[in-house]
Amino acid sequence: MKSRTSSRRYTAVGLLLTGIMLFPVYWMLNVSLTPQQDMRKSPPDLLPLHPTFEGYRAVLHDQMPYLGTSLLIGLGTVAATLVLAAPAGYSLAKLRPRGGGIMGLALLVAQMIPGIVMAMGFYGIFLNLGLLNSWWGLIIADSTIAVPFGVMIFTAFMSGIPDELTAAARIDGAGTWRTFWSVVLPVSRNALVTVSLFSFLWAWSDFVFANTLDGGGDLRPITLGIYRYIGNNNQEWNAITATAVVASVPAAVLLVLAQRYVAAGVTAGAVKD
């Protein structure tokens, strides 16, 4: 009985904390359905009693190019991250090059550099190279955040792959690249999904790099497209929150679909036999 009571208490606390954390999401949805004339109503309605879909119509009319640009940048960042991080993780995990420990420390330090500091550095470099206001410049910038994380995830995961598996491939005549491509990479599905998901989400939600490096470009991501509804004297809050809701849908769907792979990927290498 004591154990059952304790379990119910923990469940109640967990539900309460979950409700508190999800309330901003609900409120964003509520505001997106609230008519413009009711935005400053006091006290505000806890439920959308007179819902309007004007904000969502505005999103479909105005924001689709920005959503397409964000999708392009996100997929490009995923591709660049996997191409660079997977071979680097395999090298650190299985080939153990000289200086690998220092390289791992450098990757860890790279994760600690604030994004705004990197954005200022990229601005000077991109200005000299003529890469400002370009979608592929944002892919390069976002990849600098995702690649170090990806290398660490791949290294931890591939370290857990038995050496006998790679040794058997070498006995069968496979070289280093063939072993990586045909043996190691197929069994690293969890790490691939984890790195791809986080890379996409970082690029999809990026604001600092986008605002610094692509503030005046024709192809701007959704994090900048939302400013279409913000003026000096007027803010279209239902359109703003509707844009936020629509932009949150891909991230939420990906997290739900990939959660079991992510759980396995981020915990790989945490426990050693």
Image (cartoon, helix red, strand yellow):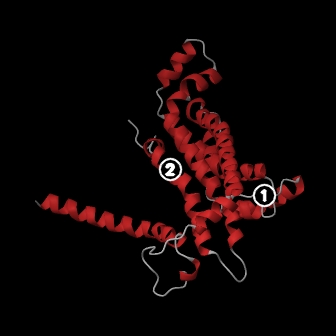
Between 148 and 75, the one nearer to me in the picture: 75
Q: Earlier in the sequence, mark 2 or mark 1?
A: 1
Q: Quadrant of the N terminus?
A: bottom left
Q: Which image quadrant is residue 37 in?
A: bottom right
Q: Which mark is residue 261?
A: none
Distance, label 2 to label 1, CA atoms, is: 32 Å
Residue 22 spot, x, y in % from top left:
43, 66
Crowding at dot 2, Cα within 10 Å, few <14 / some 14-19 / many 20+, comes out as few
- Write the residue at 78% across / 57% down: 122
Q: Which image quadrant is residue 132 in?
A: bottom right
SS of the residue at dot 1?
Answer: helix
Q: Nearer the viewer, mark 2 or mark 1?
A: 2
- Write the residue at 48% across / 75% down: 50
Residue 14 spot, x, y in % from top left:
32, 63
Q: Is residue 34 left or right of residue 141?
A: left
Q: Is residue 136 left or right of residue 28?
A: right
**Residue type, mark 1 in image:** Phe
To which residue does mark 2 refer? 253
To which residue does mark 1 refer? 122
Q: Quadrant of the C terminus?
A: top left
Is residue 44 shown to the viewer in this render? yes
Whether residues under marks 2 and 1 lie with C-beta atoms below 8 angstroms apart, the answer is: no
